[in-house]
Image (cartoon, rainbow, N blue to C red):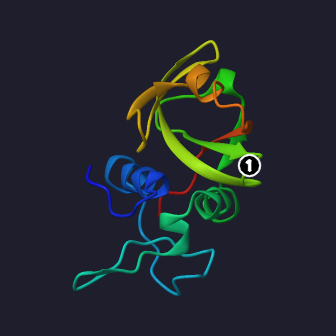
Amino acid sequence: MGKDYKYDCATFASKALHWGGKMQQRKGGRKNPSRWFRNNIGSWRLDSCTWAGAANLRQHLKNYRGGREISRYDAQPGDVIFAYYTSSKAWNHAGIVTAAKGGNINISQHGSRPQTMLNRWFDNKHLSAISIIRPGKRG
């Protein structure tokens, strides 16, 4: 998948949820946290904040899609994994779980390593927490 933004991890996860996971878009106000959509107007990209921002996508999945926070030991392909960094004090990275067994998780993401493992995420000294969300409602 091509990049739409300089920092594109949430858009990557949203594309996977929409095209791979069949999650339906919800049109409406671009800053409305209950809305989630991709929007092109000519050459302009005006996606919803929940489509294009990791922290917003996490909240949308939990609050409006019935997403459940799960343990790394219960992760399955298709779950969305988020990283919280102390340097930015925010959930600002997202990826898609592509394989998981016994807490060892393979992740697809946009970034310097398109495919990586959770233990590589933990190599970053600024990572202080992970959140794995299993999306609920697709419609």
The picture places residue 11, in percent across and down from the top left corner, at: 43, 58
Extreme left residue here? 42
Name the residue beneath numbered marker 1.
Answer: 87
Judge the density around disc 1: few (<14), some (14-19), many (≥20) Cα neighbours within 10 Å.
few
Up the image or down, 20 lies above or below 118; here it is: below
Vertical comparison of 101 with 53: above or below: above
Whole-percent x, y for residue 79 in the image: 54, 39
Count of marks placed on residues:
1
Q: Residue at x 43, y 72 (%)?
A: 37
The secondary structure type at the circle numbered 1 is loop
Q: In which quarter of the image is residue 82?
A: top right
Foreground of the two, 108 or 26: 108
Q: In which quarter of the image is residue 121?
A: top right
The amino acid on which the numbered mark 1 sits, given as a three-letter code, is Ser
Q: Is residue 134 left or right of residue 59?
A: left
79 and 2: which is toward the camera: 2
Q: Which residue lies furthest to the top in this view?
A: 102
- Residue in the image at 74% along x and 49% along y: 87
Q: Position of residue 25 (x, y in %)?
A: 42, 69
**Considering depth in this image, is 74 or 51 the residue closer to the camera?**
51
- Report the residue at 63% width, 24% height from top: 123
Q: Position of residue 68 (x, y in %)?
A: 69, 45
Residue 94 makes an appearance in the image? yes
Asked if 127 appears above or below 99 in the picture, the reply is below
Horizontally, residue 5 falls left or right of residue 101, namely left
In-front residue for pair 22/54: 54
Q: Which residue is drawn at 47% across and 74% down?
A: 26
Q: Is residue 135 visible?
A: no
